[in-house]
């Protein structure tokens, strides 16, 4: 099932009022149209055919268009107007070798005619394939014309970015710093808009969503969704899957952005802090590393739904969703949306993980033995 409507066909009067309020807030910001929105919302019926399984849907932000797609396109639609109004000729940012964020920033820079220079963190992922630094996202960065210089995971990111910008200024350039992961309140506004888009699509299809599950790292996606659904008056749990092996840090980043968004829209941040859910058992123990559970989840999504995930972000989040279902943490009445945040180009840098055994393994239905006891925690 593909849902592309832009209308609120199924919202109640109160929800329409809330949607109008959120639209009015979004209209305060300049927005540069970069992506293919709304992205599809699909039913994934073959993932969990058991009658005891929850209904699973996929929000395809991997199909957001620009530069191979991904969740940062939404953030960049709100960041780029600020870049252009500053008179900048160069965007400065940072990320790991296989950074999805950098790829999308580099693509946006190419699209609007600016240069992109980034700090490339070369030592964050401890074990990599031989061609890790030549394929996937880094190949696309270079294709989009971006240039880079090495930095260390131990470097202070804001300070390093500012030092790069200062040097470029001395060289006669006009730099603008886009924060690591596009993670500030302006970027997170893109996921306020996404919450509205999800509400439109779900209402039009008659789907009463109970949960959204997604990869969470720099925090903007999760913060934007929590605040957006709260503004809309929708009781949807937003479950962030820690991909950094740093759940305290992930929670802190989500909290900081959530508080800024709440201040912007006039919501009580104390109440919404209680809705931050960060699950911490699916990171494979280290950022950028993939375990067999992640690889199995990627293979299952590909072979049952032709859905391409990556080993660093979406694959881990999807492995978590499958495990929740297998544990009985969702009920058969739940309607669970998997937010695919993108990252597919990175899979080419992890080919060694996908041996013939992984690709051919006959996977049992993940939720076949789902029991009725434990449910996924619903917030009161």
Image (cartoon, helix red, strand yellow):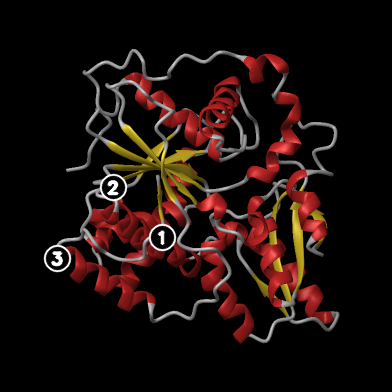
At label 2, counting other C-alpha atoms closer than 10 Å, the crowd grade (few under 14, some 14-19, many 20 or more) is: some
How much space separates mark 1 and mark 2, taking CA atoms? 18 Å
Residue at which label 3 appears: 14
Secondary structure category for the residue under label 3:
helix
Residue at image location 41% in from the left, 51% down from the top: 222
Where residue 80 sits, quadrant-wise, is bottom right
Structural distance between the alpha carbons of marks 1 and 3: 19 Å
Q: Residue 66 in the image: state x and y as whole percent.
A: 63, 62
- Residue identified by numbered label 2: 275
- Would residue 254 appear left or right of 15 to someone viewing this image? right
234 shown above or below 245: below
Q: How crowded is mark 3: few (under 14 residues within 10 Å), some or many (20 or more)?
A: few
Residue 163: image quadrant is bottom right
> Is the Cβ of the residue at disc 1 closer than 8 Å to that at disc 3?
no
Q: Which residue is identified by label 1?
A: 194
Identify the residue at horizontal 53%, vertical 33% (top origin).
Answer: 316
| Above or below, 127 relative to 109 | above
Q: Where is residue 18 in the image (x, y as percent from the top left)?
A: 22, 68
Front position among marks 1 and 2: 1
Q: Is mark 1 on a helix, strand or loop?
A: helix
Residue 303 in sight in this render: yes
Q: Which mark is residue 137?
A: none
> Viewer-nearest of labels 3 and 2?
3
Residue 227 visible to an observer of this rendering: no
Which quarter of the picture shows residue 354? top right
Secondary-structure class at tag 2: loop
């Amino acid at each position: 099932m593909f849902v592309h409507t832009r209308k609120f066909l199924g919202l109640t009067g109160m929800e329409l009022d809330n949607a109008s309020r959120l639209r009015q807030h979004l209209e305060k910001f300049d927005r540069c149209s970069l992506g293919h929105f709304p992205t599809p919302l699909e039913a994934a019926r073959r993932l969990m055919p058991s009658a005891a399984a929850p209904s699973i849907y996929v929000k395809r932000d991997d199909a957001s268009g620009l530069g191979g797609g991904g969740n940062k396109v939404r953030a960049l639609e709100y960041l780029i107007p600020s870049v252009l109004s500053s008179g900048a000729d160069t965007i400065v940012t940072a990320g790991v070798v296989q950074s999805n964020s950098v790829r999308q920033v580099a693509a946006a820079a190419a699209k609007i005619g600016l240069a992109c220079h980034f700090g490339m963190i070369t030592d964050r992922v401890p074990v990599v394939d031989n061609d890790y630094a030549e394929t996937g996202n880094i190949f696309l960065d270079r294709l989009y014309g971006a240039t880079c210089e090495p930095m260390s995971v131990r470097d202070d990111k804001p300070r390093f970015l500012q030092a790069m910008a200062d040097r470029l200024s001395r060289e006669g350039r006009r730099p603008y710093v886009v924060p690591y992961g596009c993670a500030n309140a302006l970027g997170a506004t893109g996921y306020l808009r996404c919450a509205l888009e999800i509400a439109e699509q779900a209402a039009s299809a008659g789907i009463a969503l109970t949960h959204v599950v997604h990869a969470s790292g720099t925090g903007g996606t999760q913060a934007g969704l929590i605040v957006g659904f709260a503004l809309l008056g929708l009781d949807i749990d937003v479950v962030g899957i820690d991909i950094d092996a740093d759940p305290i840090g992930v929670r802190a980043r989500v909290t900081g952005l959530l508080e800024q968004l709440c201040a912007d829209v006039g919501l009580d941040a104390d109440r919404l802090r209680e809705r931050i859910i960060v699950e911490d058992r699916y990171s494979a123990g280290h950022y950028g590393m993939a375990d067999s559970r992640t690889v199995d989840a990627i293979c299952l999504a590909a072979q049952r739904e032709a859905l391409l995930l990556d080993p660093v972000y979406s694959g881990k989040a999807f492995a978590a969703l499958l495990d929740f279902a297998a544990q009985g943490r969702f009920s058969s009445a739940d309607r669970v949306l998997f937010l695919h945040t993108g990252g597919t180009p990175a899979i080419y840098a992890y080919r060694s993980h996908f041996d013939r055994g992984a690709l051919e393994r006959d996977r049992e239905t993940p939720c076949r033995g789902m029991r009725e006891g434990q449910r996924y925690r619903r917030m009161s």
